[in-house]
Amino acid sequence: TTALLWLRRDLRLDDQAALYHALKAAEQVQPVFVFDRAILDALPRQDRRVEFIWETLAALKAELQALGSDVLVRHAVAAEEIPRLAQELGAQAVYTNADYEPAALARDAQVAAALAADGIDFHSSKDQVIFERDEVLTQAGRFFTVFTPYKNAWLKKLDPFYLQSYPVARYLPALRRCPAEPLPALSQLGFERSNLQQIGIKTGAAGASQLFEDFHDRIDNYKVARDYPGIKGVSYLSVHLRFGTVSVRRLASHAWQRGTAGSLCWLNELIWRDFYQQILWHRPDVVSHAFKPEYAQLTFPNDPALYAAWCEGRTGYPIVDAAMRQLNQTGFMHNRLRMVAASFLVKDLLIDWRWGERYFAEKLIDFDLAANNGGWQWAASTGCDAQPYFRIFNPVSQSERFDPEGRFIRRYVPELARLPTDALHAPWQAKPLVLAGAGIRLGQDYPEPVVDHATQRALALALFKRTG
Ligand code: FAD
């Protein structure tokens, strides 16, 4: 018997659920990846994520070719190509790992139906989360909408069974032997190189293990260091979790067994990840609507000039600008800054959270619908378990607290680098002499603030009060 392994956000051979199930069930397993035109055609021609996948596939090909097999890589509409390929190879089944995004669910349903018409089975496994769908429910059998009780129930349910790795290696001889095929060039897919290599993003399973090794020694300090974008406090593994170049079971298991304050705090973040995935599963409408119905009617002024200033990192608030420039230049933004930048867009610039969500979705290399939507709705106070609307971040005090020496600001807003630290967080409040001493003319070398925080805060409160 032959099975097709359809790879998507699980680009690894280690501890891979669908691969394991396919290898155990079929005599020969053929891995395949489709650069899906239904997704790719709408993207800009330089996209770090497409390049990340492409480089990862190159490594995966080398691994599989060394075993006498290969991953077939196609550029087509996946919903059509998978049933076609399954037919062509005479497969009896297609194995894949579940993806909980509404569009992916619709695509998979379409593929499953097409396969069924040809008498081919479709198997979908849990792989990218520890607990999925309704595995963790309240006593009343409902899904959790508040994180802390979800986390408690999650931890209560956790036992080594759920963290066990799939012993894929011993079944690898069941990979289908096939002649090696070259990977289509990026240009054949219609894409150009981005700056992925220059910014040093490590791709593939090897990239993920390097990052994880580097984090090994830092995990115990995570609780203390995680909030400071100027230091290396976090794991930077999000892109690997996104594309499945690392197994979440291996990460969670490590953090759990280590059992230190730092490692458990990090495990908590992985639980947030599961939390938002199950929210998306139970409430797919959050993709375009506020989770809390009382905020469905919020109407924001949405000034396009303010939006452009935010996107381009020229709001005049150095911490926000540094954050947005980090995003634009590297495709990454530190979690603390995601919260600050998101809050600033919604509550200082009074722009619809969906605009910001869309911008992040375009730029983030780790873009994940569930986490991004959850994060935005949290910051906008429209989400489940969100920040209450009257708690509004002050961008200056956030800056003073979390970038106290201005290391992060100086890196991404170099025109302010020479300002003394106490003037760096709010340059418009600095004495003219101080600005002159650093060679800065506000309004020319660096913008005046585009809005006044106190004024906007009052407007935001009024806006939310009217609606909520
Ligand atoms: P670490 O601090 O090392 O955390 C480990 C892992 O836990 C992360 O890699 C991630 O997979 C997960 N995680 C951490 N925090 C969260 C969280 N709040 N929600 C869900 N999962 C989390 N994360 C994404 O992966 N993709 C997104 O598109 C995304 N958009 C966001 C948008 C906003 C407005 C906010 C506030 C947060 C967003 N996050 C998103 C969550 C978080 O900022 C990133 O996961 C984190 O910054 C990635 O860096 P790291 O891998 O070093 O994280």
Image: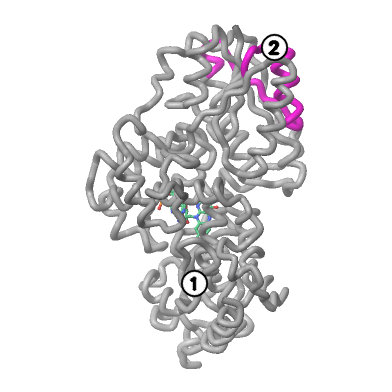
Tag 1: amino acid: Ile
Sequence-wise, the earlier of marks 1 and 2 is: 2
Q: Is residue 108 above or below residue 440?
A: above
In the image shown, does 96 or 134 lie closer to the viewer?
A: 134
Residue range highlighted in magenta: 64-93
Residue 129: assigned label: none
Quarter of the figure with the N terminus: top right
Q: Is residue 367 visible?
A: no
> Residue at image x 63%, y 23%?
32
Q: Which residue is mark 1?
A: 319
> Percent from the top left, x then y, of residue 236?
44, 48
Residue 89: assigned label: 2
Query: Which quadrant would residue 447 be assigned to in this image?
Result: bottom right
How much space separates mark 1 and mark 2, taking CA atoms? Answer: 54 Å
At mark 2, the secondary structure is: loop
- Say left or right for 16 vs 187: left
Tag 2: amino acid: Leu
**Mark count:** 2
> Residue at image x 54%, y 38%?
243
Query: Which quadrant would residue 316 be assigned to in this image?
Result: bottom right
Q: Is residue 352 visible?
A: yes
